[in-house]
Each structure stands twice: as structure tokens, then as C-alpha cells.
Image (spheres, rainbow, N blue to C red):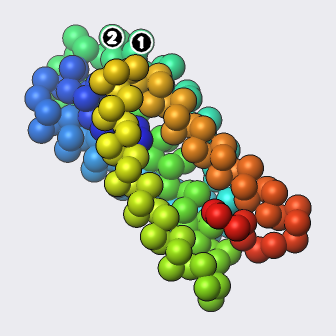
Amino acid sequence: LLEISLIQRFTRVLGEPEWSMTAVLSTLLLTSSAGSILLAGRFDWTPRRSCIAAAVAGVAGAFLLPPFLDLIASQPLPTRVLCTNGFIAPLGVAKGTPFPAVMRRLTNDPLLAWGWAQNSLFAVCGSIVGLILDSTLGLTAVAICATGSYIAAWKAWSAAEREGRRHPAGF
């Protein structure tokens, strides 16, 4: 949900959509990969911890972004790009952990393919919903919806663990 909104918001300070898209997407891809490898892989974060981290990062990013953009707007372009990367990096690390944390627990499970399908579905639908929400309600609404989806995933996983299942039905 957040990627499209971040690209739109950073276009304001980077000047061109191409700069914004390059800075935002490349940073998100690199840092979410790092989060996936380090937190969900090496440090074996649980799906619950991963979802909470992603939710907190989304809310923090939404509320800190407007003053941050005002702060860097008058800086030279290289500084604005570096600041953009620095702001987005923690978001990417946190957003990169939930999916691999869940997939790690579904290894050799019949729902593994279903998990990949759900990830693809939400990635595509999230982009569309993110554009609609951003254009009508703004970045804060997008961040709240993104946070809500991570909280819902956390609750579903927690309920499944309490019931002794390895994975939640419908998650």
C-alpha cells in the first residue's frame, strides 16, 4: 500500500517522478531483502514480531514523513536522494520480514503455494487500493490501512498459535 504514496510524496522534493520512483523502489527492494534475510532468516523473527514491526514502521513513517519532506526540500538533489534512502530504509527492513517469517513456518506445508498466491494478490490489490486511498484520503489513511493489514495478520497468526495450529485458516 505504501509504495505508491511514498513515490508520490517524494516526487515533491526530488523534482521528477523518475528520481522518486528510482530512489523509493530501489531502497525498498534492497532494504526489504535485507530485512528478509537478517530478521526473518538469520534472527528467525516470528510472524507476530514481524507484523508488529511493519505496523509500527508504517505508522511512524506516515506521521514523520510530512515534516521530513519539509526539512529536506531545500537541500541539493544528492542530499535529498540520500535522505530519501535513509528515511525509507527502516520501512523497507520492517516490511521485508512478515512474508518470509510466515513462509519459513509453512515449509513443506500444503498452504505454502496458497501463501505465495495471497502475497501476490495483496501486492496487486494493495497498489490499486493505495492509489485510491492516497488520492482521496491522503498518505495517513494509506498508512493506517497498511498498518491495519499487518495487525490483522498478526492477530490471525496469534490466534492460530493459541489453538496449536502451525498456520491460521484463512491466512
What kind of residue is marked 1? Answer: Pro
Crowd class of label 1 (few under 14; some 14 to 19; many from 20; radius 10 Å): few
Residue drawn at point x = 25 percent, y = 14 percent: 73
SS for tag 2? Answer: helix
Mark 1 vs mark 2, CA separation in Å: 5 Å
Whether residue 140 is situated above or below residue 142 in the rendered picture: above
Q: Is residue 137 visible?
A: yes
The residue under label 1 is 67
Total marks placed: 2
What kind of residue is marked 2? Answer: Asp
Whether residue 135 is situated above or below residue 167 in the rendered picture: above
Whether residue 158 is situated above or below residue 52 in the rendered picture: below
For the N terminus, the image quarter is top left
Residue drawn at point x = 72 percent, y = 55 percent: 156
Choose between 162 and 170: the one closer to the eye. Answer: 170
Whether residue 121 is situated above or below residue 26 in the rendered picture: below
Q: Which residue lies furthest to the front in this view?
A: 170
Crowd class of label 2 (few under 14; some 14 to 19; many from 20; radius 10 Å): few
**Residue 149 shown left or right of residue 12 in the figure:** right
The percent coordinates of residue 94 (x first, y second) are: 54, 47
Residue drawn at point x = 34 percent, y = 21 percent: 136
The percent coordinates of residue 74 (x first, y second) are: 22, 11
The percent coordinates of residue 33 (x first, y second) are: 43, 61
Tell me, yes or no, whether the two marked residues, 1 and 2, touch with CB atoms within 8 Å: yes
Disc marking residue 70: 2
